[in-house]
Image (cartoon, rainbow, N blue to C red):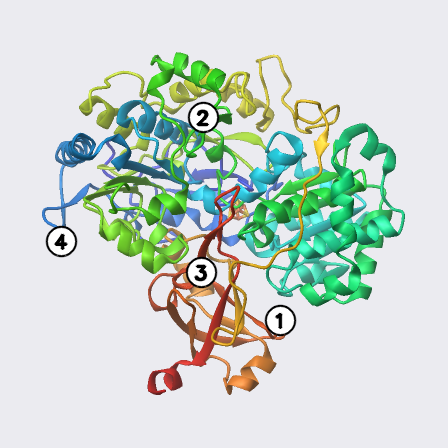
């Protein structure tokens, strides 16, 4: 870790992409100019990306984000030394590691002494490796003694996770490998756009159709993915719950339920049936805007297929009723016998690179490693024994991500925050408010590889290693634990989060138990997860490399791993899947006279999440240089808007300005903004933090807005 330039190691290294949950396999080969890696992108970078066709998930294919990932290794894009601020509002200046760490440790200790342990908080990220997520959770509970740790994955997948657990007793994004998709008879994809978010996965959709299967896409926009579908249902934002209930109604009415499966493997069908029968086709058309003939076609196609799958993504999940919405789609699967057998079932397309593993090992407010509940006495005993502390020392559940951010600097809230791998100034709902709360902290410490918008607010910035500069595991959307390998030396002055947690722990009086080596941390994680739902006990770095990843649960070294869950029984106490008792309800905020349109937000092909990394890659920036407001030609005409003209979008929380992009791919009652940018075009200035009561997921996916021509809006 002491190289003066990010030189590549000698040989090619098999590893995985730093971005999304597909975790595509790639090979990093020493670049053409290994010595002079100072330059920007392309020539001069220490490694180049080669295909790795043998890795089964992406079979060599990569999207532009993965192909250009080495640009992030260029020093010009990076933080290369700690920064700190001497006084509030003063400039950030360079500092040595000892000075920065002393300052952080002293600040955390002071806050804890003056305001109690829960006044210190930790906010993690779904991009952190399993080892980092695990030790971050341990650091919060054992070193800081705080209950207040959560992470940005709460914004990403928590509703699907909650619904999964409620129905099946266990949450793994996909209970089957992606390679099963082409063998199902009908796939319903709800609120996901893999053609832009994870293009290599589209081959599975194409193969499904080549095999004679049907693809139904549910999305308020005619996305690139919807264009591949046999049938595109285009509901109003927030209509997904009613839509699923309406399809179940028709499946029941058409006699397409699998009575034998319902009797043998489920409970709770009676009330679910009753609720579905109250969602008759005309009513569902009124709620969703989807014509009855399309509802009938979708229900028949899914109900008559030999096997069927439903996959959800952020569309139905990021709602104040996200858990119930996903539950309604699971009900449709259960009623038709599409669960617990090959080529059938419900799954969630997780978003972030380690969205799956990041939620399993303890950086979530209510969970301990191995996907254990922090309120389960046996789980607390097990984890406490691995950590070498009494179980009583482990705090109880803390605040969920948005509630934690909303309480920053307030009485009873967190006053000193350690934040790793997240950029809430851009990615949190009601981001203007969250930015104010971050500013109200006594101490903000940000560990990141770039000077993100959130890092710019920090009192101390700690530059950390990334992706190709370190070893570590992640768990992809299939539950496949994979291994990222170090391929280059990090810049001098940059350290791993594992190292800095060890250093901070020592300064705070816990000199043992925080290994800086990833494989050592993983060995402890295996023991901590043993016997839990997400059991990694039998998974080793050696096995992962030899087997192209290992699917959890894998309780022992001679266990083959579990690519397909629930084939014999579901993970509930009685082994039966549970129907959810759900009914349609409106969103927390529906359009009205003052705010007459829906806003929905999402991602574009060339950017990733808050854009902190991809906005620093010239090729990606050229492809997607800034935000925009997508609107239907009829709405544009009504507003007198021409393409490219700046539009002001206003919600009850804030205002964003971005150029108009006119397209008939969107509903006339809805506008769309991508959320990758900060500044005037920040989509999350507008979004609604209303929370799902079960998952505590904010309602990112829809809120009420008004749209005006920006120059008129200024003068009226
Ligand atoms: S699809 Fe996802 S994992 Fe694959 S290359 Fe693109 S961003 Fe990386």
Would you say the residues marked 1 and 3 are in contact, meaning their CB atoms lie under 8 Å apart?
no
The alpha-carbon separation of the residues under discs 4 and 3 comes to 31 Å
Between circles 1 and 3, the one closer to the viewer is 3
Residue at horizontal 39 percent and vertical 80 percent from the top: 710
Please indicate, yes or no, whether residue 526 appears anywhere in the rendered image.
Answer: no
The alpha-carbon separation of the residues under discs 1 and 3 comes to 19 Å
Tell me which label, 4 or 3, sits earlier in the chain. 4
> Dividing the image into 4 quarters, which one contains the C terminus?
bottom left
The kind of secondary structure element at disc 3 is loop
The alpha-carbon separation of the residues under discs 1 and 4 comes to 46 Å
* Residue 91: mark in rendering: 4
Q: Tell whether circle 1 marks a residue whose Cβ is less than 8 angstroms from ligand 1.
A: no
Q: Identify the residue under disc 2.
A: 374
Would you say the residues marked 1 and 4 are in contact, meaning their CB atoms lie under 8 Å apart?
no
Would you say the residues marked 3 and 2 are in contact, meaning their CB atoms lie under 8 Å apart?
no
Residue at horizontal 42 percent and vertical 66 percent from the top: 625
* Residue 667: mark in rendering: 1
């Amino acid at each position: 870790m002491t190289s003066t330039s990010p030189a590549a190691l000698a040989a090619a290294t098999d590893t995985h992409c730093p971005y999304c949950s597909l975790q595509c396999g790639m090979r990093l080969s020493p670049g053409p100019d290994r010595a002079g890696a100072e330059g920007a992108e392309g020539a001069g970078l220490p490694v180049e990306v080669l295909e790795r066709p043998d890795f089964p998930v992406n079979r060599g294919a990569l999207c532009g984000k993965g192909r250009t990932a080495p640009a992030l290794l260029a020093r010009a894009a990076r933080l290369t030394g700690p920064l700190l601020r001497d006084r509030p509002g003063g400039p950030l200046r360079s500092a040595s590691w000892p000075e920065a760490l002393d300052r952080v440790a002293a600040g955390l200790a002071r806050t804890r002494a003056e305001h109690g342990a829960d006044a210190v908080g930790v906010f993690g990220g779904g991009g952190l490796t399993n080892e980092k997520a695990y030790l971050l959770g341990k650091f919060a509970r054992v070193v800081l003694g705080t209950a207040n740790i959560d992470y940005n994955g709460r914004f990403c997948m928590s509703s699907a996770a909650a619904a999964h657990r409620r129905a099946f007793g266990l949450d793994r994004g996909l209970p089957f490998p992606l390679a099963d998709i082409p063998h199902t008879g009908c796939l319903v994809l709800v609120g996901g756009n893999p053609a832009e978010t994870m293009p290599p996965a589209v081959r599975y959709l194409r193969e499904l159709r080549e095999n004679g299967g049907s693809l139904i896409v549910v999305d308020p926009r005619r996305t690139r993915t919807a264009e591949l579908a046999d049938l595109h249902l285009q509901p109003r934002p927030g209509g997904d719950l009613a839509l699923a209930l309406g399809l179940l109604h028709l499946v029941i009415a058409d006699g397409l339920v699998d009575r034998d499966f319902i009797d043998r493997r489920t409970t709770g069908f009676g009330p679910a049936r009753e609720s579905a029968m109250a969602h008759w086709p005309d009513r569902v058309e009124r709620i969703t805007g989807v014509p009855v003939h399309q509802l009938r076609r979708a229900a028949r196609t899914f109900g008559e297929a030999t096997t069927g799958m439903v996959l959800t993504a952020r569309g139905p999940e990021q709602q104040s009723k996200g858990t119930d919405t996903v539950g309604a789609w699971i009900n449709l699967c259960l009623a038709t016998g599409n669960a617990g057998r090959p080529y059938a079932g419900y799954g969630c397309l997780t978003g972030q690179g380690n969205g799956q593993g990041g939620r399993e090992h303890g950086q979530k407010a209510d969970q301990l490693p191995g996907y254990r509940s922090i309120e389960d006495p046996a789980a607390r005993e097990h984890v406490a024994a691995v950590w070498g502390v009494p179980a009583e020392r482990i705090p109880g559940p803390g605040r969920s991500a948005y509630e934690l951010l909303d309480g920053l600097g307030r009485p009873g809230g967190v006053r000193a925050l350690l934040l790793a791998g997240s950029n809430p100034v851009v990615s949190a709902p009601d981001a203007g408010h969250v930015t104010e709360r971050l500013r109200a902290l006594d101490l903000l410490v940000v560990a990141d590889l770039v000077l993100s918008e959130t890092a710019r607010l920090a009192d101390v910035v700690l530059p950390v290693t990334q992706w190709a500069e370190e070893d570590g595991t992640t768990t992809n959307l299939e539950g496949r634990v994979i291994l990222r390998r170090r391929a280059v030396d990090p810049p001098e002055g940059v350290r791993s989060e594992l190292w800095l947690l060890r250093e901070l722990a020592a300064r705070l009086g816990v000199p043992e138990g925080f290994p800086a080596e990833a494989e050592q941390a993983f060995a402890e994680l295996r023991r901590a997860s043993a016997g839990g739902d997400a059991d990694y006990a039998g998974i080793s770095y050696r096995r992962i490399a030899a087997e192209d990843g290992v699917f959890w649960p894998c309780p022992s070294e001679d266990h083959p791993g579990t690519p397909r869950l629930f084939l014999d029984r579901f993970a509930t106490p009685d082994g039966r899947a549970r129907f959810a008792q759900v009914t349609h309800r409106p969103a927390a905020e529906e359009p009205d006279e003052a705010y007459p349109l829906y806003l929905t937000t999402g991602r574009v092909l060339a950017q990733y999440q808050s854009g902190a990394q991809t906005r620093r890659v010239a090729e990606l920036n050229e492809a997607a240089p800034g935000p925009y407001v997508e609107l239907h030609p009829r709405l544009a005409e009504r507003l007198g808007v021409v393409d490219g003209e700046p539009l002001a979008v206003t919600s009850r929380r804030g205002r964003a300005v971005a150029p108009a992009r006119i397209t008939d791919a969107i509903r006339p009652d809805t506008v769309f903004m991508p959320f990758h940018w900060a500044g005037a075009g920040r989509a999350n200035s507008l979004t609604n933090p209303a929370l799902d009561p079960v998952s505590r997921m904010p309602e990112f996916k829809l809120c009420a807005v008004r749209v005006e021509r920006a120059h008129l809006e200024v003068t009226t």
